[in-house]
Image (tube, rainbow, N blue to C red):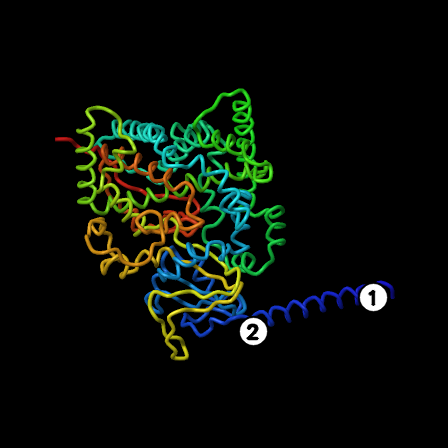
Amino acid sequence: MEIERLLFENATRVSLFVVIALAYFLYRRYTRISVSHIPGPEPESFILGNLPELFQSQVGVPDFKWKQQFGDIVRIKGPFGEDRLFISDPKAMQYIFHTAGYGFLKWPERTEISRVLMGRGLLWADDAIHRRQRKVMLPGFGAPECKAFVPIFLKAASALVEQWNDLLASSMDQSVELNVASWLSRATMDSLGEAAFDYHFGALENKENELMKAYFGLMSDTLGQPSRQAIFTQTVMPVWYLRFMARCSNTRRMVHARHTAELANDIAQSLINMKSEALLYGKENKDILSLLVKANASENPASRLTDEEMLAQMRTLLLAGHETSSTSLVWCILELSRHPEVQSRLREEIRATERRLNGRQFTASDFDNMPYLAAVLKESMRFQPAVYQNYRMAAHDTVLPLSKPITTTTGETISSLPIGKGTKLVLSIAAYNRNKEVFGEDADVYNPDRWFRNSEKKGPTVGVYGNLLTFAGGVRTCIGWRFALYEMQSLLVEIINNFELGPTKELERLRREACLVMLPTLEGEEIKGENLPLRVSIAGRD
């Protein structure tokens, strides 16, 4: 009888909890500001709404479809009929990224993904914590500091060129098919290691390195092609449950993520100890970690990064710092392989600049004075955005300004949109980058010449480079955007100066894998990770 009584009491408590939780959910849903009158696609199901199409599609597929059907403000459905907004409107984007500052926070479930992959660092943090972390890290990413890293970037680029030349020398027809994505990932890891940590990973030399093996393929393995069950768990279950699963789950994805985190923490801790000891003895280096350790030591104790945060910043640099640069460059090189006239014109500018250098090495100033190089990079990041979406949630009731009026499902025309606290937003960088009013009527075409048009600037300012959102904007502008830009310029100049790149038949199976960043994979071989097979040959000289 005692057991039956206890079972009845526990069942009663659980039922009461469920009733209270359901009542609170219904209260919040029907009392906050509604966006249900905004046009949008029909949900695939009541349980998951439009989320399977959003998260399981290749990059850009739902973005372009919904933009074409419904415009720049779209209502989509989350779990159990929850209304969310899919946004590519320039004025609304400017308000969210710039004007409102920390008025839009990250989705809690997305921050948990950041924590698992990179720790409680800059990409995880929000509001006051983000502001404090960013202040300590800024000294390592100023313009002079990033320009000083160019010789390191060129060194890694030269090592890549040397390896490709060796492969070509042993080829019968002086050309070879290479997985360019893998090579660029290794090159950016090496340049990042030396510039950020004064540490040689040896990725291009294929040195046995367990950390490198763990990092290569991490994004595609842990985030690519989520199942419906994974989408349900990630979007419906509370954060405490997600943290529990991150610690205890034995799925391949979680085991890979935990193993990589352990390896990264170990090497980051040893590097931090080494830099701290050097600072103690007055030995200072100019790598980012040394500058960060010095800046952190001089901070007010209340503003300093904790030991956990220091490790997280290193893991953030290792993953986000190398993955976004290499991926952006991969898609740029793909477009150059598809547009040989653009590739040839860029090579002409590179070699014309090289002749003026009289044998000295390229510098950041040289890159800054190469307009076609800038146009190619901007156009490639616009047309093939490595970072294709951002996810935000309104921290309080607010009103979104709109670039142009929209018509609701009730027939009302509105020029601004009230949204309630807690409303989740998907900010589509991919769709914004195809906005014809901002980038011209040919926005759906790859054309670097658009950056030389003399027409007046259109649309509000949203991004720090070419008015693109590749590096986000406002208080969340990517702290390393200059670092990434000079790294990409260095690699691109060396590659195009020395080689011609062309497409292969394998590109017919190319996929744009959605893994927080847009990774190239091949249909049927997704499990192998990023893959961009291109034909590489020597670029002849007159």
Looking at the image, which residue sits at the far front?
300
Q: Quadrant of residue 120?
A: top right
Image quadrant holding the C terminus, namely top left
Looking at the image, which residue sits at the far bottom?
410
Pinpoint residue 378: horizontal percent, then vertical percent: 29, 47
Q: Nearer the viewer, residue 93 or 240?
A: 93
Q: Is residue 459 above or below residue 380?
A: below
Pinpoint residue 12: horizontal percent, then vertical percent: 76, 68
Q: CA distance from mark 1 to mark 2?
A: 39 Å
**Residue lying at 22% horizontally and 30% vertically, measured from the top left:** 172
Residue type at mark 2 is Tyr
In the image, is 13 to the left or to the right of 465?
right
- Label of residue 4 in the image: 1
Q: Is residue 36 above or below residue 172?
A: below
Q: Is residue 66 visible?
A: no
Q: Quadrant of residue 534?
A: top left
In the image, is 75 to the left or to the right of 22?
left
**Residue lying at 26% horizontally and 43% vertically, measured from the top left:** 374
Q: Nearer the viewer, residue 379 or 51?
A: 379
Please say if the residues under marks 1 and 2 sit with CB atoms less than 8 Å apart: no
Q: Is residue 244 visible?
A: yes
Image quadrant holding the N terminus, namely bottom right
Tag nearer the camera, 1 or 2? 2
Residue type at mark 1 is Glu
Pinpoint residue 432: horizontal percent, then vertical percent: 34, 58
Looking at the image, which residue sits at the far right?
1
Mark 1 neighbour class, 10 Å CA radius: few under 14, some 14 to 19, many 20 or more: few
Q: Nearer the viewer, residue 442 or 102?
A: 102
Quick one: SS at disc 1? helix
Pinpoint residue 376: horizontal percent, then vertical percent: 25, 45
Mark 2, residue position: 30
**Residue lying at 28% horizontally and 42% vertically, measured from the top left:** 333
